[in-house]
Amino acid sequence: MQTEKLKIIPLGGLGEFGMNCLAVRWEDDIIVIDAGLMFPESELLGVDIVVPDITYLLENKQHVRAIVLTHGHEDHIGGLPWILSELKVPVYATEFTLAYVEGKLEEHELLDETELIEIAPKEKLSIGPFTIEPIRVTHSLVDCVALAIETPVGIVIHTGDFKIDLAPLDDKAFDLHTFAEYGQRGVLALLQDSTNVDRHGYTPSERAVRPRLEEIFSRTGKKLFFTCFSSSIYRIRIAMELARAHGRKVAVAGRSMVESVEIAQDLGYLDVPPGLLINPGQLRDFPPEQLMILISGTQGEPMSALSRAAVDNHRHAKVEAGDTVVLSSRIIPGNEKSIYRVIDHLFRRDANVIYDDGSNGLIHVSGHGSQEEMRLLINLVRPKYFIPIHGDYRNLRRHAGVAMETGAVDHAIVLEDGDVLELDSDDARKRDKVTAGRVLIDSGSSIDVVEDLVIRDRRILSEDGIVLAVLAINKRTGKVERAPELVMRGFGAADISDQARETVLKTLDGLSAEQKSDYGMVNEKVRVELKRLIQKSTGRRPLIMPVILEI
Amino acid sequence: MQTEKLKIIPLGGLGEFGMNCLAVRWEDDIIVIDAGLMFPESELLGVDIVVPDITYLLENKQHVRAIVLTHGHEDHIGGLPWILSELKVPVYATEFTLAYVEGKLEEHELLDETELIEIAPKEKLSIGPFTIEPIRVTHSLVDCVALAIETPVGIVIHTGDFKIDLAPLDDKAFDLHTFAEYGQRGVLALLQDSTNVDRHGYTPSERAVRPRLEEIFSRTGKKLFFTCFSSSIYRIRIAMELARAHGRKVAVAGRSMVESVEIAQDLGYLDVPPGLLINPGQLRDFPPEQLMILISGTQGEPMSALSRAAVDNHRHAKVEAGDTVVLSSRIIPGNEKSIYRVIDHLFRRDANVIYDDGSNGLIHVSGHGSQEEMRLLINLVRPKYFIPIHGDYRNLRRHAGVAMETGAVDHAIVLEDGDVLELDSDDARKRDKVTAGRVLIDSGSSIDVVEDLVIRDRRILSEDGIVLAVLAINKRTGKVERAPELVMRGFGAADISDQARETVLKTLDGLSAEQKSDYGMVNEKVRVELKRLIQKSTGRRPLIMPVILEI
């Protein structure tokens, strides 16, 4: 009789959106699925990113065999530099996902020391006692897989992120057959993406935005700015095809967009005919009606190319009266203020702004399946145990309910980060908990400023001290009304306080009145410049929090 | 020939949502329409509310004749205490609006010194050169009016907030006829609510939520918690009618809800049969299936009754397994995190939570008209000049477009706060600007703590110093891992730093681990307690900003 149990231990993403990370353990072998980050809530001042607490993995360092990635979104790979700096293990991922990972590791000087192993759908691989088959799924990003993991007590399927796009743009179909086969064989546990459990029905295909975008391209007379998540390769493909069909050259602006287009082109996901792409510097050589600018900054990130273009602060991309700006993306909750700030700037320049507010037609579709797709996959796989993953507690609970209603699962189990689920072929129960939680990181890098800083934990950072920069800005005139006050604690910074004050003043001087009314931008600029100064002068990296007083 | 011009000068609400305030001037007579507040964006730390800069009114103190209110929502009346503390003028409003105003002025000890004058639809009144007719409109709140203002150069109509509810619950119809008559007579300018310009079609009646709520009441077996904006009198009425029909007693919890129900009952907007209402203390005397708790806190406000009930911290209202909680309100952008935190707490208690996420049926309707209602009113009024009000710049621009498409207006003019529009019977143009902007206020009062502090400007407050309280909380254990660090600047606070540290520790000790993981709540609690201590010991009221370090 089998007395040993399989352990499923979520370390992130079960109880919050983002920082997905889950350990699967059989005796002394652990594999980790995904290593994501999330963005902090507004109360966590001075924090750039949040990653899962991996104490459990560090305590079992010698047993961790691999990190296996399902796809290349930040909430699945963004925590890698942090984890790999503490844990040297090989990383398995598909070709496209690896390209993103390489860029990220290079930036953090971890590329050379990390073993990267390419995987592909239908090609099984073995890691310790586990045999893993990647299964092709569809999503907003290309080259995404689910993972079927054969273990000594049965098969566990982890869906990664997915929707069931029945008409994918790259003809790489969601592999219904393999899921069906596993369903026939018998599946012990299905771990399934809960993101869109609030949505009834079926999520439209990535293709579904094309008619409305076609219409926009048809009636646009002047320059066309197009922004979407830089990883939305299908969206970029549609935009480029339309640009070409409508006689527009394409300039790519913004670091993340440039990188993403390069990778997608290299790997054959974008078929760019010669002569279509131009450099941003060439924008002035063409009449406006022959131009599309593919630009990053869909969430109103203060330092992004679009945010800068919106206040005439981009070297090449200038928004002029009559231009059209399409934001082909979701307004992520929490980002409304910054997105609408950018949209207002664009309206002030008499641009025609088209964004996803429900009234502008179908210019964006979600990458996550709705309830019917969840039910379909459950019906195909028919697992004994159903475990919802990726979501706040309320999503997990609802997803468990949706699963039970199908009648195709025996049990639905809601886990949260740190729970240990012990499974064998006919039993599953939660045993004690392991350490889990969030680690807050000040990454030191803003969107367009590459710095060679290794990310560090806020725990450590806070020992480097705290800087509070109090700025009094007259919103109407944009003038700085009082010398900025700097409160510095925890590091011998008295000597540089004059310099720091000067740096802040100079930074503010460099911003237009319009920029100064955008507190997100003021915040970011002041933080970056102060950080640079303090690190150079003292070697310390304190937490830096600008506080804006409006006068 | 008339050489004098009518001046329309928006001081708030044109370029942002909230803090609506607009001056109308003829020679030496000024009337002010509405005096609202708004809630600050997250970058503005330590600020409770934002009100319009009324420098222009103060500079013309002797000319300001009155403040006329359209209805009782905070974004139309919330700035009154601030304005009235600097400017003694009579306030005109309908009966219900005045009841809200009285409560507010009493709290700020301004009631005795303020002249309040009741107005009513169809009853014209004269203020200086202006003859004003309030016109009944429908909205989510009762007793709302538009204002038709007869001026020496023509009629100006200000809609206030409105939708066109063609089946109002209180049978008080939107007064289409009076708008039509003004349209026949000829209207110089229409100033119209832009809030929902992004929505096509027609906003449903307040009545439209009833079927779905009926269904929820029918199938709920245990306690039913019902929350909505406390000013949503129609919603409260429906909930109470359903409670009665389904044999449930009603307990009202939360200060704002209690006040609102009292006012609505007094003025005949709620017909509450004897025996329906019980005190929260009597909740234990009835079986759960005979109870409805009408509770405030629909936006997840950390100190609200619902937030406290959700973490077992309310004296009477306890959420138990199988209870149903209905959030019959919009999730206001920016509040998602706090609302979802509360919802997660409720799910953890195995409550059935029904909230407005698009998948739960029609449990909330907007109080603002959609595009068709905007077009209808424009068609009735047919103004020479159309001026969109209430909205971000993008809303105003779109609304101007919607108006021009009707063919029923000659010109649409987009104004922003501080613009001066000069009008006569055949000309309108923007002349210079007056001072306008936002004033940030630290009101010192949290939701359930009434303090007798007069609200004060952050400009002044910042001269009282700044306190930064750095808290290191272990999220997992809820333990405070390090002595809180207090950075105090700008007031002689060295003597109380030990006491302050102790206060923070004691406050944190008083919170459960679950509460400590809710940073909004930690923030609020620490601020209130520190403020109390510092004010008592030093008489100063510094800005207080808690900073949470997660360990």
Image (cartoon, coloured by chain):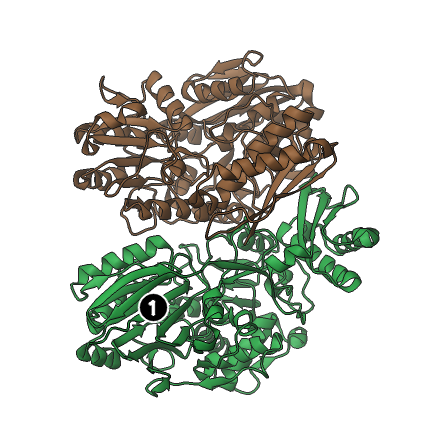
Chain colours: A green, B brown
Q: Residue B108, located in which quarter of the rendered image?
A: top right
Amino acid type indicated by mark 1: Ile
Query: Image point 36% across, 40% down: which residue?
Result: B310
- Residue B22 is situated, as x and y percent measured from the top left of the image, at 57, 31
Query: Image point 61% across, 25% down: which residue?
Result: B83
| Residue toward you, B440 or B125 | B440
Chain designation of label 1: A
- Residue B400 is situated, as x and y percent measured from the top left of the image, at 51, 46
Q: Is residue A446 left or right of residue B71?
A: right
Up the image or down, B516 lies above or below B83; here it is below
Tell which residue pokes out farthest to the top in this image: B112
Up the image or down, A373 lies above or below B55; here it is below
- Residue B307 is situated, as x and y percent measured from the top left of the image, at 40, 38
| Residue toward you, B22 or B175 | B22
- Mark 1 element type: strand
Up the image or down, A196 lies above or below A66; here it is above
- Residue B467 is situated, as x and y percent measured from the top left of the image, at 66, 38
Q: Which residue is mark 1?
A: A8
Q: Is residue B40 left or right of residue B368?
A: right
Badge 1 density bin: few <14, some 14–19, many ≥20, Cα 10 Å: many
